[in-house]
Amino acid sequence: MHTYVQQETWSQLLSKATRYINNTSEYALRDINPGGCYSAVWTRDAAYILKDQFLSGNTRTVLEQIISIWIHQIGGIKEKIVYGRGSPGTNFTPMAAGLELNKNFEHALPTTIYQDFSEVYGQNPDIDSTALMISTTSWILSRLLKKRRETYLNDNDVGLLHRLVVSSTDFLSHVIDFAVPRMLAAVEYLARRDIDHDGLLEQDQNEDWMDTALRDGKVVYSQSSWILALKNLSILMFFLGRDSEGQRLKKLADDSILSIERILWSDNDACYIDLQKDQYISDVSNRTLTQDVSLYLVAVTENLNDDYDSFITSPLEESQQKKEHLHLTRFYQRAIKTLEALRKRIWKNEWPLVTEIELRKTGPWVLKPNQYHNHTFWPWITGIEMLARSRFNRVEECNILLSKLASELAPHTQSFYEWIDPTTSQGNGAFPFRTGISAIRIAISDILQTDKI
């Protein structure tokens, strides 16, 4: 039974959430670059901004932007590709990718799309840029197909829905025809990043959103974006009547989750945690916890309450259902421990920071403590942590986080800044930073659609 205190907290959260949505609606309908001083398109950031725009009802423009991004899939058009600016392997020197590297990068999305060229920031395409765009594109297309089904068809007539989609000549069908082959090819590229075949993708340094932290190896956040891509694309395949493809992608996602549970869970730390290359032979208890492991909790719980199971042609056997129930029970227990570890180790005086300790080494820029990715407050990933906590009914903690995000930092709301120094409360970086605003709005949308009490 829920207490009166919980109900009061939930009411406070709803009030703040509604006010935040209303106060930031104008930012949802602007361009898909991160805003402020950034005019180029960052693929990973665009994944959040596009989802926010879709939730705001800007469907036609979102579909057009999806095409504009997937046009830049490496190998799809002849375009100059620059790589290596963020990699110690190139001495942080940008280099033009030749034909051989272009072939190695083929089917990935670039980190950044400029007017005249595209950039792969690290030595290889970052996993999250490609995976998050697969996830968002699939999520949007699936919901449009679901809406079409609910509008025109009896739920039981799935075959007619498939025929309608295939035969239709409208813009949605055009986007599906354009994007689906590209996303399937991108999945094959990402699958090849599992170099040692343990079910986890591997990266070199600075090939994720924390592009100065020099993380490499098996990063929980990157695996999480991969799982989101697989789960949402598999659902789209079921909607399109391509059940065998959907089952294959679902199995890849399930296998990745099992690998994370086996390899990236730390009993010593009581949380999920990265396994970096230089830590393979060291004590795992010395590993650094990062706030973005919260994306894994989001990825596993994604779509659990949706009705997409009706599209799966072969129901699970009873033994398999029991096995999955046991996996979810274990995951739930570990997820709660991870949320508790984040609050204990990451939160400093109610500031949730991106790293639990100051980084010993950064690059290509040497960062001072409490600067950029070095032990600072980032509204966008805090929005993801809030979403993760909401999935586990941590209403009080969601209320604390939203209070921090929506509080005024003279003369502006804190979440409008790219990052904030927690020791001075000084906002820094791009302003207004639409990625953060959109991530928070997405989390709020998810919370408002779920009965937490």
Image: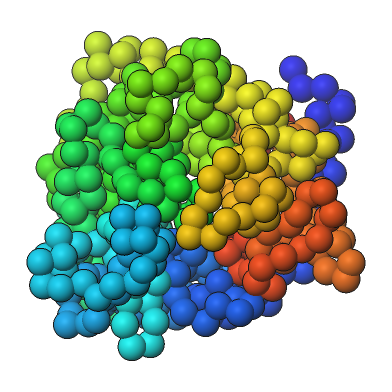
x and y, in percent, of residue 134 in the image: 32, 57
Considering only vertical position in the picture, is 199 above or below 66?
A: above
Considering only vertical position in the picture, is 210 above or below 133?
A: above
| Residue at the (61%, 55%) spot, across then down | 367
Question: Total of numbered circles in the picture?
Answer: 0
x and y, in percent, of residue 257 in the image: 34, 29
Residue at the outermost bottom position: 116
Tell me which corner region of the image, top left, top right, bottom left or bottom right, holds residue 256. top left
Q: Is residue 120 left or right of residue 344?
A: left
Please name whichever residue, 272 or 451, is drawn nearer the observer in this view of the structure.
Answer: 272
| Residue at the (69%, 73%) spot, across then down | 431
Tell me which corner region of the image, top left, top right, bottom left or bottom right, holds residue 41. bottom left
Residue 39 is at least partly visible in this image: yes
Tell me which corner region of the image, top left, top right, bottom left or bottom right, holds residue 67. bottom left
Considering only vertical position in the picture, is 167 above or below 11?
A: below
x and y, in percent, of residue 40 in the image: 46, 79
Quarter of the figure with the C terminus = top right
What colour scheme does the image use? rainbow
| Residue at the (87%, 61%) spot, across then down | 408
Q: Is residue 314 left or right of residue 394?
A: left
Residue 66 is at least partly visible in this image: no
Residue at the outermost right position: 410
Please name whichever residue, 49 or 425, is drawn nearer the observer in this view of the structure.
Answer: 425
Q: Is residue 179 left or right of residue 388?
A: left
Please name whichever residue, 121 or 342, is drawn nearer the observer in this view of the structure.
Answer: 121
Q: Is residue 173 left or right of residue 29?
A: left
Quarter of the figure with the N terminus = top right
| Residue at the (86%, 35%) spot, across then down | 8
Residue at the outermost front position: 91
x and y, in percent, of residue 440 in the image: 64, 55
